[in-house]
Amino acid sequence: MGAKQTRAEKYQDLMDKTGFSPEQIKNLHTRFQQLSDNEETISREDLEKIPALANNPIRKQIIEAFFDKRNQHQNEVGAFQEIGFEQFLMVMSHFRPPTLKTTEEEKEAMRKEKLRFLFNMHDTDNDGTITLEEYRKVVEELLKKSGAIGLEAAKAIADAAMLEVASTNVPHMAPEDFYEGITFEHFEQILKGLEMESRMHIRFLDVDTTTMRCGKSKS
Amino acid sequence: MADLRPSRSRFCPRLTAAFLCVFLLVFLHCASASRDAVSGGNDTGIRPVRSTQEDPHDHHGNSTEHKKAFPVLAFNFEHVRKPFEISMWILLALLMKLGFHIIPRISHVVPESCLLIVVGLLVGGTIKAVEGTNAPVLDSKLFFLYLLPPIILDAGYFLPIRPFTENLGTILVFAVLGTLWNVFFIGGTMFAVCQIEGAGLGDVNLLSCLLFGSIISAVDPVAVLAVFEEIHINELLHILVFGESLLNDAVTVVLYHLFQEFSREGSVSVGDALLGVVCFFVVSLGGILVGFIYGILGAFTSRFTSHTRVIEPLFVFIYSYMAYLSAEVFHLSGIMSLIACGVIMRPYVEANISHKSYTTVKYFLKMWSSVSETLIFIFLGVSTVAGPHVWNWTFVVFTVFLCLVSRVLGVIGLTSIINKFRIVKLTKKDQFIVAYGGLRGAIAFSLGFLLTDSKMKHMFLTAIITVIFFTVFVQGMTIRPLVELLAVKRKKESKGSINEEIHTQFLDHLLTGIEDVCGHYGHHHWKDKLNRFNKKYVKKWLIAGERSTEPQLISFYNKMELKQAMMLVEGGSSAKLPTVMSSVSMQNIQPREPPRRRAMPNISKSREEEIRKILRANLQNTRQRLRSYSRHDLMIDPFEDNVSEVRLRKQRVEMGRRVTLMSFHLCLPEHQVFTYDDTESPRSAEMKPGSAAVQLLNESPQRSDQSDAEPNAKQDDQEEQLKLSRCLSDPGPNQDQLEQGSLVS
């Protein structure tokens, strides 16, 4: 009795913080238990064990994102070694979709939050800008399955992309000026057309235990 | 305002010329038709043979019988009658299309489809007035076999895949359930209406009403395309209405044949209804399968066409057309087959065919579909004048009214169900546009025309034509002001941003990864699986050479560079790359080295300006040289067997990149491995050993590795000279390299 009550309170707390519904929190909790082998926290190794992630070119960045303190919205920087369920949920909350009731300002805020998440994934050294080196790394990771051609082209593509960001945001630079890196505002500007709030989401509605390991969940 | 006056004085002679052409065409039609009437009979097949046989006989007769003067000039129209008429019609269509764009005011208010129908009405009226009853009618065979496929192929080949697949569920619900609802609602209510005393409709039974309903309820892709293309609405709404109009063909085909069979039989049993449901699945899935097979065949064939570039576009067209015809043989859905073929074929074919073949395919499809569309609307107008009409006020008015009501109810009802499953919900504005965009068109007319002749058929046809006119004219004309009034989101201008492409891909991987962490096998998971399967097995089979392993990001990037390069080369000196209205160059973003002595401490600003001017002037010469070079290139391309298309493409990309970079960089940082050769610079004599250092970002990775290594080596001894000459050098492509790139013959 007592345990259930605290769980309900805990869920209420989490609901307020992350905006998930109780069923969703319960489902994610089940998954968390699975990943952590019924312990309280998960570490990087636990996430690396997921077989389906092995084929993903940006696996490392994704796993890092879970342990990144910046994604916890508490104005800290650095990285955790292990995270608990609450931190897990906070990271997941970045992928909630907007509903019919979401107002324009809320959509704007949502978009900013999602873009911030992406920005943090690229900006690995926490200095607030994405430098050319970091951007090159991003593109290299995307193309790393393609061998040597991929690496060469990655550099060219990253350079061209950086040039595009610079020329859209700072149209007139003297030849000696140096464009430090992509700041968050420039990042927002350049990805304005993608409408992040509608694209960066996954369907949490039908995540339940029976469909987790095998089979397609209906959505 | 001042602009209008000269254009007005200009358009008067053009307008009169256009009208003269119209009258000439009509006159010739009538002349040929009357000649036909005089000769009595309309089997033109025999006629030309007879007339050609006559001539030699006459000739012989002349020479043996009596000395008649040799006929210098003879009039033999029958010989070329059929192709002549076809060409005349097409010419009329094209001239009309031309004419509308010269008169700007009308085309802004009235959509083109309306104008074309009006022209058709005029032409039909003229023919009828001059001729009597011999006006041509939109033959169903002509429509379904020749006029419709190009439009559908154009739509299917250029279908934007991503929004289509993202909204596939919604589109299918609208197409299948929406059309079913429309059919039964309209059919049922019309039957109820027909029971009303005093309407004179007592002989129309339920099955006929349902048949009529199945003809009239399908949203027409031609009409939707014609209207929606001009209003530039946002991608989601466009793909919803358009996708619905394409996919409801399967439902229409099944229901039409079903009710036709039943109304012939006279009764229907439950078993028949079940068979109907099975038939639906067979028709749609069978059609898609047929298209799929032909698409794979087409892709496979295009893998081997590297030596015969000229016929590449034909493969695309012929395979698609065969897919359509094969589906029609089995009464499967030809439209779905055509779309499946185009969609499957496209990614592989585009990777295989040359750039010019791609352009050819694109332009031929656009051209054919444009001509078809124009002809369809004109014929619609002509057939309206021609066909026997049976006007029944009750029937027609109720039909129009019910079409509107059922559409609105259907959309609202279905959206409330769909929104439970959608992430991005459809707002009321969206629903309104979807409902309002349900236009009927020529498909409905042709299906009605195929019915067996009877008084009921004429009544149906009249009602169908009225509905078509209503939707095209009223809804077509008012949709644009309504869109503006409701402030519906318009299509955003896509500039092909490399950042967006990078992040789209990044997002795909990210979302797949998060789904995997959640243990949730959602859309992204399956999409990712499909992509990997595609990359691993399918691409190897269907794409030739090294393109098969090229990741999408690189091909996107290459395409963009190629486009920019071609724009620059073709535009000449006045061309400006649209994206760069800024003075930012590569140098601005390169990581800055710890400050070294500047290479040119003594040169003043004005001198720098002078130097830059000189370099720019040289750049013009370079561009001209480039232009003639590339023209030579392009000419050799289709006929040379030894040309590796890939290498040529890369060469062109390099050239383009060179030119791009040339325009913006006059001064370079050290570590930049860059694309031009210093051999033409004023200090080239000293620079020779170092010139190898600054090489192209070349095709083979090894070479660039070398060149990467070289600057570092040379840095130490020739640092200053390098800097200086790089800053001053005229970035001209090396003569040797040009020739090396030019083709081995």
Image (cartoon, rainbow, N blue to C red):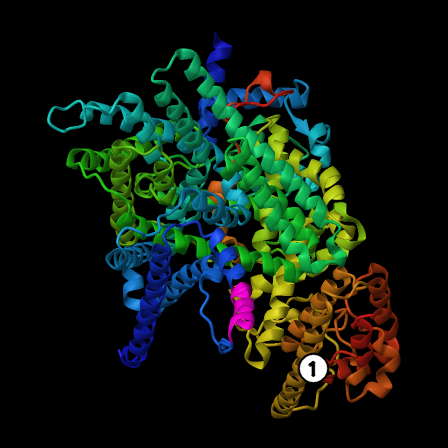
- Element at label 1: helix
From the viewer's perspective, tell me whether residue B600 is left or right of residue B408: right
**In percent of the image, x 27 and y 53: which residue is there?**
B477
Residue closer to the observer: B434 or B656: B434
Q: Position of residue A172 (x, y in %)?
A: 53, 73
Q: Position of residue B390 (x, y in %)?
A: 21, 39
Chain of the residue under the numbered disc 1 shown in the image: B
**In percent of the image, x 28 and y 39: which residue is there?**
B461
- Point out the residue furthest to the front here: B65
**In percent of the image, x 74 and y 39: which residue is there?**
B536
Residue closer to the observer: B267 or B101: B267
Q: Residues within 10 Å of mark 1 (few under 14, many from 20)?
A: some
Label 1 belongs to which residue?
Answer: B625
Residue closer to the observer: A172 or B665: B665
Indicate the quadrant containing the N terminus of chain B: top left, top right, bottom left or bottom right.
Answer: bottom left
B711 is within the stretch colored magenta:
no
Above/below status of A208 relative to B120? above
The image quarter containing residue B101 is: bottom left
The image quarter containing residue B657 is: bottom right
Residues in magenta, as a range: B55-66
Above/below status of B546 relative to B515? below
- Point out the residue furthest to the top here: A1
From the viewer's perspective, tell me whether residue B569 is left or right of residue B71: right
Q: Is residue B422 visible?
A: no
